[in-house]
Image (cartoon, helix red, strand yellow):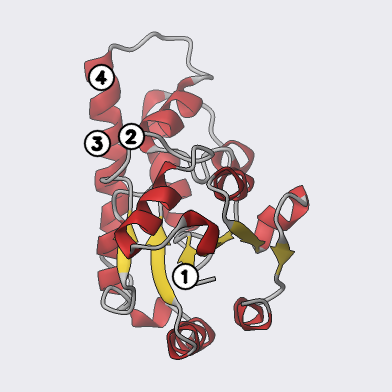
Amino acid sequence: MKAVIFDLDGVLVFTDKFHFKAWKALADELGIYFDEAINNRLRGVSRMESLEIVLERSDKTYTEKEKLAFAAKKNEIYRGYLTAMTENDVTEEVRCTLTKLKEKGYKIAVGSSSKNAKLILEKVKLLDVFDKIADGNDIQKSKPDPEVFLKAAEFLGVEPESCYVVEDAEAGVIAGNRANMKTIATGDAKQSKLANYEIQKFSDILNIV
């Protein structure tokens, strides 16, 4: 095993609350019901696919132009929240674990469906820590399709079979499995029991790799 690929939201940082607030603001403006349960369905899903889920409860039909405008507005609201993020939004445990992985000779990458991944990593002072970053700007298909993880492995110059994937969402674990990588589940992903390994805290990764 040569590399560890990390999902971003819910693994390295926690921006779920910002996603929820941004989608809720859009849904409220459109008069559509939106709650935490619906928000959970959006995890690891692309922006446009997330919008389709949000619009399921609408009694109106929207054009593609309108949908693109809605998605852009949500992202504008979301990015507004991201600007307030700092290095304090990443725990010392995460930083130390990433350092120890590199000391052990592993290449590390981010594999995220978010198109804002680099912005977030820059804000929390992690951008230069990772060898490579594959995000929503590099892919056509979101998780559970394995494209983002395969792209991360390609960027690293490592065979997929030589990679671990750390994920907090079931869709991400499925994507890692489909990429023929060893999957490590944290957070809600542990409930699916689909991963090769489970961790209780971030530093437990060091007991696996």
**First of labels 4, 3 by sequence position:** 4
x and y percentages locating residue 86 in the rendered image = 32, 77
**Split into 4 quadrants, where in the image is the C terminus?**
bottom right
- Cβ–Cβ under 8 Å for marks 4 and 3: no
Disc 4 marks which residue? Answer: 66
Q: Amino acid at mark 2?
A: Gln
**Residue 72: mark in rendering:** 3
Mark 2 to mark 3: distance in Å? 18 Å
Disc 1 marks which residue? Answer: 3
Q: Amino acid at mark 1?
A: Ala
- Out of 121 and 28, give the one closest to the viewer: 121
Q: Residues within 10 Å of mark 2 (few under 14, many from 20)?
A: few
x and y percentages locating residue 54 in the rendered image = 48, 28
Mark 4 to mark 3: distance in Å? 10 Å
Please name the residue shown 48% across and 64% down the image.
Answer: 6
Mark 1 to mark 4: distance in Å? 41 Å
| Quarter of the view holding residue 171 | top right
Would you place residue 188 above or below residue 73 in this image?
below
Q: Residues within 10 Å of mark 3 (few under 14, many from 20)?
A: some
Secondary structure beneath disc 3? helix
Does 48 sit left or right of 105 as displayed? left
Mark 1 to mark 2: distance in Å? 23 Å
x and y percentages locating residue 192 in the rendered image = 75, 48
